[in-house]
Every structure is written in C-alpha cells, then in structure tokens.
Image (spheres, grey):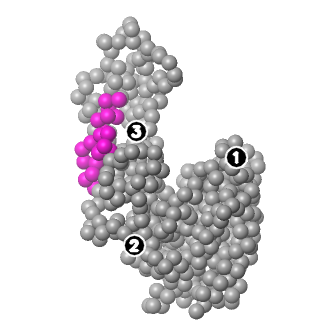
Amino acid sequence: MSLQQVFDHLDANMSTYKTRLSDAVAIPSVSNSQETEHVEATRSVLEDYTRCLLESIGATVDMREIGDNQEYPPVIFATLGTSASKKTVLVYGHMDVQPAQMSDGWDTEPFAMTTIDGKMYGRGTTDDKGPVLAWINAIEAYQQENIPLPVNIKFVLEGMEESGDSGPLQDLILSEADGFFAGIDYTCISDNYWLGQNTPCITYGLRGIVYFHVNVKCAKKDLHSGVHGGVVYEGMAELCAILNSMVAPNGDITITGINRDVLPMTPEEEASYGPIDFNIDTYKSELGVTKLTHRTKAGILQHRWRYPSLSIHGIEGAFSDAGDKTVIPAEITGKFSIRLVPDMDPQKVTNLVKAHIRSFHNSTGSENEVTVSTTASAFSWLGDTSDANYTAGKRATVRVHHKAADLTREGGSIPITLTLQEATGASVMMLPIGSSDDGAHSQNEKLNVSNYLNGMKLLASYMYEVSQLAAGR
Ligand SMILES: [Zn+2]
C-alpha cells in the first residue's frame, strides 16, 4: 500500500526533519519585537527559509505585503498542484514565535534546538514551526517516493500570529475570497495541542470574546478618606459592586439574558464528552487548585468549551502598592471579559452588559459617571464534526495512532479560524500534533520527536483520506 511507503520514508528520514526544525528554530523570528534582529528574522524566516523549502517541493510562492511601509512581515500564499480531479486543502500556519531568553528560566538556549530524551527543546518547536514543517516533510515524502500527492495544497503562512494583531491578515484573506481562497474544499490548521499527553485530538470549536472596560468617576480629584470618607459615593465601592453583580464566585454569570443564545446541548454532543481522555485530578494539580466549580469530567469540559464565562482581570487606577494609603480614588477602570460560545453575538452581549450596568448604577442612587466600552471582540467558532474534512481527520488518526481522536474544543479565541471559514465557505478543522505539556509560550517549549514523526504521518494520512472520501471510498 502506497501510504506505508510514505510512512517508511518518513521513518527513514527523521534526521533530515530534525535538522530542518533545528534550522527553523535558529531563526529568532520573535513576533512584533522592536529589536532589529527579530524584525529581520521574522521577515527572513518567511522570505528566505520557508519560501525556499516550499519552492523545493514545487510550490508556487506568492509573497504578499500587508500594512504600509513593510511595517508587518509578509504573508506567504503558496500553491502546490491545481488538478481539477483533486480536492484542494488549505493549510494555515505561522513562523513567528513568542519571545524567549535564557534569563526567563530556560534550561537550554531557546534558539538552539536541543534534543533530550526524545524531546526537542526550543522556541517554536511546537508553536508553530514544527507543525508547518510536518506538512512540508509529509508532502516531500510523497514526492520522493514518486507517489502523486493525493490533493492540491494551498498554504497561508504568516509572521504576526503571536502578536495578536491579526487584523491586516484577516482583511487580506477576506479581500482574496474570490481570488486565492476560491476553490478550496477544506482547511486544516495544526496550531493547537492535544488535551493530554496520550490521546490525539481533533478540535472543532473555539470560544469568542468581548473585552470590557467600565470606568467610574466619583470626584474631580483623589480624596482623603479621613476627611471625606462617609459622605462621598465612592467610586471603588460602586465599581466593586458592579463587578460583583455580574458573576458569582461559582462562575455563574448573573447578567439577565446572557445565556439566551447559548446553543442547547444535543444528545450527540452530550455523549461526545464521555470517551474524552481527561483526568480531573491531574488537571487540578496542573492548576494548583483543590476544588473546581464543576465536579464531573463533562461538566468541567463543557464549562471550558461550550458555556460562556466571565473573568474579572483588574482595576486600573486603584491603589495596588504594598503598604497602606488612605485614598479615595477619583477615577478607576474595571476590566473584565466574557468568553462567548455559539450562538452568542458580541454586539448583543455588549448591549446586555451595558443595560445591566446602567440599571445597577441607577439602583445605587449615586450620581457617579459610569461609562462602559469594549476593546476587543470575536465570535466563537464551531465546525461540523460529521463532514468529510473531519471524517478524513478521524480516519487518519486511527490509521496512525490506532485509536480514535478525542473531539475537543478550545476555550480561547483564534480569530483567523473563523476568517478562513468565511473566506473559503468551506469546512475548517484543527488537527493538532503537539502534546498538552509542550509548553507553547512558556519556558522550555518542546516538541516530542514521536509527536513530530506521528504528526507527519497523520498529515500524510489526512491527505490520503481526503482523496479516498472524494473517490467515494
Ligand atoms: Zn501558534
């Protein structure tokens, strides 16, 4: 069987693939840094390193500038194969990384990949250079075995992901909906992680977010509590009461109407949590907490993934130094966010929050100035796990790992996912290859050698299964 030949090739060439990843890690493409070295590296990792690799597998590479005056690194649009008889798969990934230096507490040089006990340590190994290279390696293996690639591939590879500034890329993608993104059948993103360390996952959902600032102004200047305390409607007291009125200590959101648009649970979804490999005690000890707001595995996962949550993040302008200060702050700003789930609408949520705060403020009798604004918002995303894209991912997982993938969601927000779905009008699937303990964004980021190799086999199998399903097999 031809796929076995691809697997054998991948097994036999692991040292090449490790060198490749090591070369990529050595380019310090730190996202959104002011350092000239990082700015140049982020440009170079795309324009030189990645472009060269893509051209070596025969892809047509189109470097696209975003923003003005080269303020952003370019985006790679690459095309490999245009056969009308094959499905076209879009691959998204990023070649920029989080900052890292030895003094942060790394045990090895972050930009010099070091392999210890089957773990390849280095910034970007798992997020996201390793997964991007896994695609290229898998494609190259088909080619070097003289087996026709089962699908056409398009790549979108960027260098701004870790900066959180995805606006310019989103604009470019949407403007190319009828251009580069026309004719794409499926999108596959490998830029997240398994839920644990042993069971492969397919991720089909992300939460959205709205971030709020609520500003309370109670006087024209800071006041002395010994002189004026007792007669002023103090802003801090009102702000704390406002924040407290929105969420209970057990996590319940107490804003009227907030849960109205939350998709009801279907029996199929309820059942899907049962088989997921997730240990409550391990999770609690990872977090260093003794009790969670929910007791069952399903309850915990559902409240991380498919129900909204409200978190209070901080108060700007409040006294927060050590020691005592008897101040009544004149003006403070509370910051909180709500994670959104299907089918919540960021604008509707904003309106509900504003109405809640207005009515709460009116009930206090204060004449303080209270204003609410939002700084960021993103819709949630939900894939259809029964479509052909996911079927290919599930089959590929069983082929490589000999067990079914856990169907997971992420509690965070990755806006590009929804943008790609909008631009292509087609199914998007997240197919992670890294383990939960890889430490993306953290010290000692790593990718297991086994995850790298199995990830290549997974992606090779996924391409094969897409073609099989298209052929009705
Ligand atoms: Zn990433």
Q: Amino acid at mark 2?
A: Thr
Residue farthest to the bottom? 1
Q: Is residue 361 visible?
A: yes
Q: Which residue is mark 2?
A: 385
Which of the pair 370/162 is nearer the observer?
162
Q: Which residue is mark 1?
A: 101
Q: At x 42% / y 50%, what residue is drawn?
A: 284
Q: At x 58% / y 54%, what residue is drawn?
A: 439
Between discs 3 and 1, the one toward the N terminus:
1
Q: Quadrant for residue 272, please give it.
A: bottom left
Q: At x 31% / y 43%, what residue is drawn?
A: 250
| Up/down of 335 relative to 432, above or below | above
Q: Quadrant of the N terminus?
A: bottom right
**Residue span colored magenta:** 240-261
Q: Left or right: 113 with respect to 458?
A: right
Instruction: Confirm or reject: label 1 Cβ below 8 Å from ligand 1.
Output: no
Between discs 2 and 3, the one toward the N terminus:
3
Q: Quadrant for residue 104, please give it.
A: top right
Residue farthest to the top? 227
Residue 139 lies, in percent from the top left, at: 64, 79
Q: Is residue 180 visible?
A: no
Callout 1 secondary element? loop
Crowding at dot 1, Cα within 10 Å, few <14 / some 14-19 / many 20+, comes out as: few
Where residue 312 is drawn, which disc sits there? 3
Residue 317 lies, in percent from the top left, at: 47, 26
Which of the pair 471/459 is nearer the observer?
459
